[in-house]
Amino acid sequence: MTERFLDDPDVQRMLRIREGDAVAFEEFVSAYAPVLINFMRRFVGNDVVAEDLAQEVFLKVHRAAPTYEPTARFKTWLLTIATNLCLNEKRRSGRRSHQSLEALGEGDEVGRSRDWIADEGPMPEARLESGELQEKVRAAIAALPESQRAVVLMARYEQLSYVEMAQATGLTIMAVKSLLNRAKTNLKKHLSREIRDFLVAPPEENA
Amino acid sequence: MRNPSDDPKRTTPPDVRADFDAEDEALWSLLGAVDEVAPTRSFVSRTVDRARAERRAAETRPLFRRPWLATGLTAAAAIVGAIVIFGRPGDDATRESTQAPVATNDISDVVDILSNLGDDDLLVLEARDAEAVQDEYLGG
């Protein structure tokens, strides 16, 4: 056991789950359901699939609890499971016969990643609730290859450092930096006009 | 539900932000435009219920669906004069299942039981001293 993670309240709760504390598990699900569902939603672009995958992460954690040892920050460990599950889902959905979504038509790896996204665009309610910007941002994230998407989601929405992203993906720090740089480059291509507008307008107008 | 972490200057790890230029900062801010959703109302209870069901199943699974274990255990029971009890799942499968348990140390019985298992059937094994279960399961 790595002592330096024992101060993490999430690790302490996980140790309670390891001892069979059902209340601790329910607390954990309540606390992390929004995090995992939104992580999955951004990753797979589909609300229903996102909830199913998030539930599977919780079940995997529950199954792994008896042998849990805190060897990383809890959130990093959790996102490792979540990312692996997303990648497995990609492989699984890639084998399905009805995967022939329209190619993006931009060549390179950006287009290649879209064949497993269940719903490329924003979900219907999002179209109603949000504006064009949100739709474009979601489409840009969805168009990223899954490995780039994973590090963008971890860095931007889950506040993981390079070291933590490397732990979660099993890559080197240099590889993570490279992935994130390529992801930013691809996102900037998709959002060039929005970025230009953002830079021209005063920041408070964009807040 | 808005993204609560839409202030990238506050939430992005310093090592990541250290590599940013002005375009990166703008991009990071734009990414905050993606909304967040709340879990459906029943999500937590459904997840907890599924986990509990899995645990209950796991607690009685070690001896399930393992023909080699069933036959091996039965053979061992025959040698030492013990009895193996087979039943369907329940809190105490050998007593509360809807089907009567089978107590035997005869390999042919075990083969018969295993060959008739359906997908949803779970096999519960319990090894007991033969004399101790004689009255209870074999009618004395």
Image (tube, coloured by chain):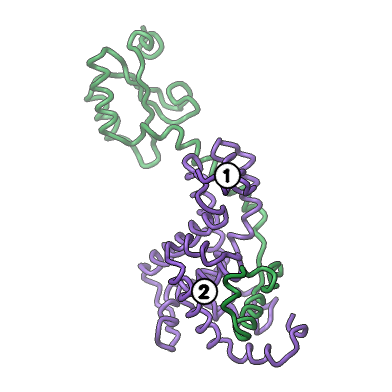
Chain colours: A purple, B green
Have a look at marks 2 and 1 and say if they share a chain.
yes
Disc 1 residue type? Met
**Rendering coords of residue B140 (x, y %):** 36, 6
Viewer-nearest of discs 2 and 1: 1
Which type of secondary structure does the marked residue at label 1 adopt?
helix
Q: Viewed as shown, does residue A29 lie left or right of A60?
A: right
Which quadrant holds the C terminus of chain A? bottom right
Local packing at callout 2 (Cα closer than 10 Å; few below 14, some 14-19, many 20+) is some
Give above or below for A184 relative to A199: above
Circle 2 marks a residue in which chain? A
Per the rendering, the mark at residue A14 is 1
B14 vs B53, left or right, is right
Element type where label 2 sits in the image: loop
Q: Residues within 10 Å of mark 1 (few under 14, many from 20)?
A: many
**Which chain hosts label 1?**
A
| Amino acid at pointer 2 | Asp
Look at 45% across and 81% down and name the residue there: A110
* Rendered residue at 65%/58% (across/down): B40
